[in-house]
Amino acid sequence: AGSVEEAFAPQVFLLVGRGFYAGVGAGVTISDGLEDSPSDAFYMGRIGWDIALLGTIELDPHATYRFESWDEIEDIEFDSDVFTLGATVRFQIN
């Protein structure tokens, strides 16, 4: 969001699917270094695959595309500045 200070970006997703999934999300950036904090909302599309590894351990590789307004979704062009590949490892404790 352009801040040179510590920033937090809470996000929420609505995902559908089991194993392979897809969905949309939204978030904001919160920082003392921003003129307007929290920032305006940003939006994301995400696809991923939740893979069971060893019983209670899961790997979730995913790709997320971030855009600033719904108008941008009509003109999707690959922009490496807003496209992120990531992975999450989850441990379930019973």
Image (cartoon, rainbow, N blue to C red):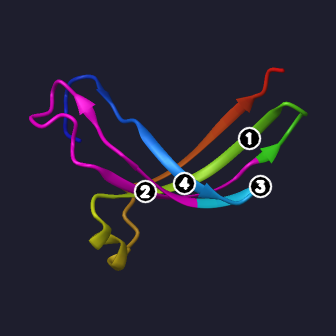
Give the Cα separation between the discs numbered 4 and 3. Answer: 15 Å
* Residue 59 disc label: 1
The C terminus is located in which quarter? Answer: top right
34 horizontally vs 78: left or right: left
Q: Which residue is mark 3?
A: 19
> Residue sitting at 69 percent across and 44 percent down?
60
Q: Residue furthest bottom?
A: 74
- In space, the residues marked 2 and 3 are separated at their CA atoms by 20 Å
Inspect the image, locate mark 3, and give the three-letter code of the amino acid beneath it: Gly
User: Which residue carries the number 4 mark?
Assistant: 14
| Relative to 25, residue 1 above or below | above
Mark positioned earlier in the residue sequence (4 or 3): 4
Label 1, label 3: how far apart the Cα atoms are: 10 Å
Left or right of residue 86: residue 58 = right
Task: Specify the amino acid type for callout 1.
Answer: Leu
What's the distance in space between the residues labelled 4 and 2, CA to CA? 10 Å
Which of the image's four quarters has the N terminus?
A: top left
Contact (Cβ within 8 Å) of mark 4 with mark 2: no
Residue at image location 33% in from the left, 78% down from the top: 75
- Magenta residue check for 32: yes
Task: Give amino acid for label 2.
Answer: Met
Q: Earlier in the sequence, mark 4 or mark 2?
A: 4
Residue with the mark numbered 2: 44
Mark 4: amino acid: Leu
Q: Position of residue 63 (x, y in %)?
A: 55, 55
The segment highlighted magenta reads 23-50
Q: Residues within 10 Å of mark 2 (few under 14, many from 20)?
A: many
The foreground one among 48 and 40 is: 40
| Residue reaching furthest to the left | 35
User: Measuring 78% from the left and 38% from the top, which residue is drawn there?
Assistant: 58
Secondary structure state at the residue bearing disc 3? loop
